[in-house]
Amino acid sequence: MFLERCQLPIGKDKDMEEIFKRISVRKYEDRPVEKDKIEMILRAAMAAPSAGNQQPWEFYVVTDKETIKKLSECSPYSGCAAGAPSVLVPCYRTEGLMFPEFDKIDLSIATENALLEITSLGLGGVWLAVAPIQDRVENVTKVLNIPSTLVPFALVPFGYPAESREQQNRYDEARVHYVG
């Protein structure tokens, strides 16, 4: 599918195909996600590179329906979380970091890894920004009783998708600049 769209002479293997299949899924089947799949998502997130290998992340996995409902009210854009069977909440530490100026970059990479693994497992999810919007940070912190040494970075509702579509081809040659 992707290979046809881009007409690239790439081999027959499908390594990294999740990058070109991942879409933002906001509607989910009423079906729980298995614990082994959740663990694989967490493993993928924690496999992310980080500045100085500081690994500033900690993750909350929320499966309680009432708590998910409260999380869905934490931002004007998080309503779709209400129908998810699971919500991943990546957080970054504020203490003991060698390179604190890179904490949000590190969490961005970890969150993308989680989303790619979600796709790989036949699930769907969406990245809903929390940090650096202070009221969203405070709302999520309050709902999950997150300690002051952690900052919630995003909400990632995920589950078995109740919607599907193809990913847009976002490649724009005009934005590429070769040097040398």
Image (spheres, helix red, strand yellow):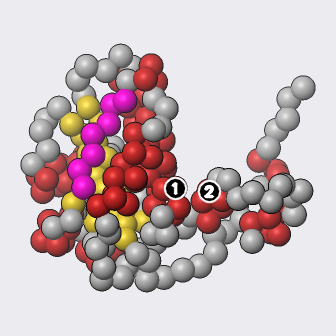
Q: Position of residue 55 (x, y in %)?
A: 37, 29
> Main SS of the magenta segment?
strand
Residue at image point 35% right, 16% down: 98
Label 1 amino acid? Leu
User: Quadrant of the image for the C terminus?
Assistant: top right
Residue 88, quarter of the rendered image = bottom left
Residue bearing the label numbered 2: 19
Whether the residues at callouts 1 and 2 have beta carbons within 8 Å, the answer is yes
Q: Residue 9 vs residue 24: left or right?
A: right
Q: Residue 145 vs residue 179: left or right?
A: left
Q: Is residue 52 above or below residue 122?
A: above
Q: Which residues are magenta?
A: 55-61
Q: Is residue 132 above or below residue 178?
A: below
In the rendered image, the residue lying farthest to the front is 36
Disc 1 crowd, CA 10 A, few/some/many (<14, 14-19, 20+): many
Label 2 amino acid? Ile
Q: Residue 150 vs residue 48: left or right?
A: left
Of residue 66 and residue 15, the one placed in the foreground of this image is 15
